[in-house]
Amino acid sequence: MTKQEVQCINVIFVGMILYHQKKDRWLEWIPCPLEMIIFIMLLVKRFLTLIFQTSISMTDKFLSTEKENLEDLTVIWLDEHSQDRHTKARLRCIINFLKIFTELNLCLDYINSIHNEHIFLIVSGRLSSQLIPLVQDRSQIVHIYIFCQDSDRYSSLQVRGIFIDQELLYNQLSKDANQFYATHSTVISFATEKSLRDLTKETGTFLWFQLFITALFDMSPSNAAKQDILKLARTFYADNDLELQRIDRFDRTYKAVEALKWYSSDSFVYRLLNKAIRTENIDLLFACRFFIVDLHRQLTSLHESYIERLRSSNLNEHKVYHGQLMTEDDFTKLQTNVNQLISINSFLSTSIDPDVALIFSGNDAIHSTMKSVLFEITINVAETMAVYRYPFADISAYSNFTEEKEVLFSLGAMFRIEDISKRA
């Protein structure tokens, strides 16, 4: 994808907000009296830390209730004929959470009930003309595919593709799923979720999440915490043999110093963590706690040497870039908060190469309800502090995709929006 092939909006962040010397210095931005708030917050933080240090497993909540989707994607197949075991297994190797329907009304009811997932919809030719007009404009629908025996008959319908060969359908589904994870990052998501923060209007919720992750970062390593996420993952992926093999390998070989390597690969722990962060699912976040802590600590260990390397190059500023698709609502929120602070409630993946980030900004021509956005982030290298409150570092050496030249920011980084403009 070239710069001419996508209309992209530049969002320029000036200098990462560097609350470094005083651990809770970000409290200075609260637009209300502080003494009582600080006292209550310290109590809450202590309470959270005590909870996290107990041996009680919150993952039991997931294991004792009806199975829910712990990833971002759901694949739905509507066909009058049920699918065989082999078809189900193949689909779960691409998108684990699978729902198969033989009745249109039941399928439609389920789609209407989905709020926190994105749907890849496969529909038979016979039912396509009935279902597609009812759901094609739904925000939760990412792509629609028709599987039939006569592709010309349904060519007038607006869909991602029409397939008569099942293998070709699998291949397209796999490509689209990979593209989704690349372009729909966890930085900014639905308006009903909390990925984008306006600190002057949502102070209470912002502070709660900051306290939560701070308490997580203060936790000591625990094998019990690792077993929590393994137990949860084995239950969720029980029908997915390929993913179960990866989980077993993670159990046998994982080391804390390899957290970045696992995060940068297409792993179950990456997908579970991103879903937990995007939806602020406290139970799922707790289940992922050991991995969050390992990621943050590995970034912290790399951060100081990265800053020293930048300063040795006599740079006053250092720019990195992040590309993604964004909903109209979230983009409007950005526009109304120029010169304001925002917080990113995910691990933020960036690149020193703007062309790489541009690829990840996606193509809003395919997604008419989305905006293709390129974030330009300026880091003030000349600041006098030794380290930053929210560590970041070049993780190319730990990534399977070294050509992406990735710089990763830790959870909860804060920025000020300086400018928003449309690319020529």
Image (cartoon, helix red, strand yellow):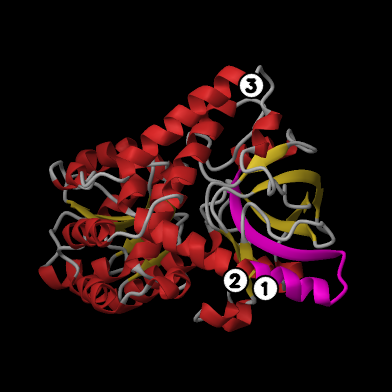
Q: Quadrant of the C terminus?
A: bottom right
What amino acid type is highlighted by mark number 3? Leu
User: Image quadrant of residue 195?
Assistant: top right
Residues at marks 1 and 3, CA–CA distance in whole angstroms: 35 Å
Residues at marks 2 and 1, CA–CA distance in whole angstroms: 6 Å
Q: Is residue 354 visible?
A: no
Please name whichever residue, 405 or 52, is drawn nearer the observer in this view of the structure. Answer: 52
What amino acid type is highlighted by mark number 2? Leu
Point out residue 366 in the picture as x, y percentages from the top left corner.
57, 58
Label 2 or label 3, whichever comes before in sequence order: 3
- Within the magenta stretch, is there residue 309? yes
Query: Pointer 2 and pointer 1: residues touching (CB < 8 Å)?
Result: yes
Instruction: Magenta stretch: give its range.
Output: 304-327
Judging by the rendered image, the residue that carries numbered circle 1 is 305
- Within the magenta stretch, is there residue 292? no
Point out residue 37 in the picture as x, y percentages from the top left corner.
56, 22
Residue plotted at (44% across, 48% down): 277
Q: Callout 3: few (<14), some (14-19), or many (20+) C-alpha neighbours within 10 Å?
A: few
Q: Which mark is residue 302?
A: 2
Residue plotted at (62% across, 38% down): 24
Query: Pointer 1 and pointer 3: residues touching (CB < 8 Å)?
Result: no
Label 1 or label 3, whichever comes before in sequence order: 3
Residues at marks 2 and 3, CA–CA distance in whole angstroms: 34 Å
- Number of marks present in the image shown: 3
Q: Which mark is residue 34?
A: 3
What amino acid type is highlighted by mark number 1? Ser
Point out residue 246 in the picture as x, y percentages from the top left corner.
26, 75
User: Horizontally, is 258 left or right of 416 in the view?
Assistant: left
Residue plotted at (35% across, 77% down): 168
User: Horizontally, is 228 left or right of 199 in the view?
Assistant: left
